[in-house]
Image (tube, rainbow, N blue to C red):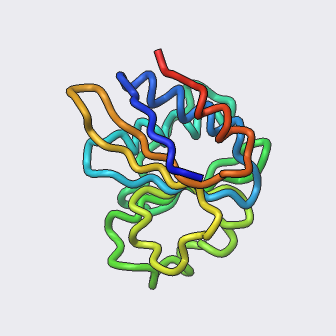
């Protein structure tokens, strides 16, 4: 299936996209977020984690220094990886990558995964298109109803 491009006119639209995908996530899923600094990866991640954990006020610290934070969600444990500081996939096993992949993994800076990037991952490339506007290029989950729903969705 062709990549899907969605224009996100505001941070709230990015959050809405994240909430929609959180409802569709299931054990074994990997969501890989790429994009330059300031593209909205943290905005997406916080909204995704709050939605999947059903806690809109949950504190979601950036795992930039810890590299990974684990969250207990009803559907499965969710591991939020921020790989900005890694040079490559060498240290991932020490961070619990293999066990984390049994639940749901949300990865910022997935280029550091190398060959460990899951083949069936949902890949979201965020880009800055305006002061608050972003673009999202989405690939993967071709056989999932959430992908069809996103193709028809237009953020407010």
Residue sticking out furthest to the bottom: 90
Depth order, front residue of 99/112: 112
Is 1 on the left-hand or right-hand side of 86?
right
Quarter of the image where one finds residue 51: top right
Is 90 on the left-hand or right-hand side of 38?
right
Quarter of the image where one finds residue 151: top right
Return the x and y of residue 128 as percentages of the image width and height: 26, 38
Return the x and y of residue 13 as percentages of the image width and height: 45, 24
Return the x and y of residue 88 as percentages of the image width and height: 38, 79
Depth order, front residue of 82/127: 127
Is 61 on the left-hand or right-hand side of 86?
right
Residue at 46%, 38% (x, y): give it.
Answer: 44
Residue sticking out furthest to the left: 131
Residue sticking out furthest to the front: 2
Residue at 49%, 37% (x, y): give it.
Answer: 46
Return the x and y of residue 28 as percentages of the image width and height: 73, 61
Residue at 45%, 34% (x, y): give it.
Answer: 6
Number of numbered tags placed on the structure image: 0
Establish if 36 lies above or below 9: below
Quarter of the image where one finds residue 146: top right
Depth order, front residue of 148/56: 148
Residue at 42%, 59% (x, y): give it.
Answer: 82
């Amino acid at each position: 299936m062709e990549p899907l491009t969605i224009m996100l006119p505001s941070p709230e639209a990015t959050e809405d996209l994240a909430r929609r995908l959180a409802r569709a996530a299931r054990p074994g899923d990997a969501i890989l977020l790429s994009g330059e600094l300031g593209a909205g990866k943290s905005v997406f991640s916080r909204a995704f984690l709050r939605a999947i954990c059903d806690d809109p006020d949950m504190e979601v610290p950036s795992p930039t220094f810890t590299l990974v934070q684990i969250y207990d969600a009803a559907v499965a444990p969710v591991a939020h990886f921020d790989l900005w500081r890694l040079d490559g996939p060498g240290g991932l096993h020490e961070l619990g990558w293999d066990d984390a992949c049994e639940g749901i993994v949300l990865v910022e800076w997935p280029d550091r995964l190398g060959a460990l990037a899951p083949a069936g991952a949902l890949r979201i490339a965020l880009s800055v298109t305006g002061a608050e506007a972003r673009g999202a290029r989405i690939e993967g989950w071709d056989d999932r109803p959430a992908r069809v729903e996103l193709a028809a969705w237009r953020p407010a």
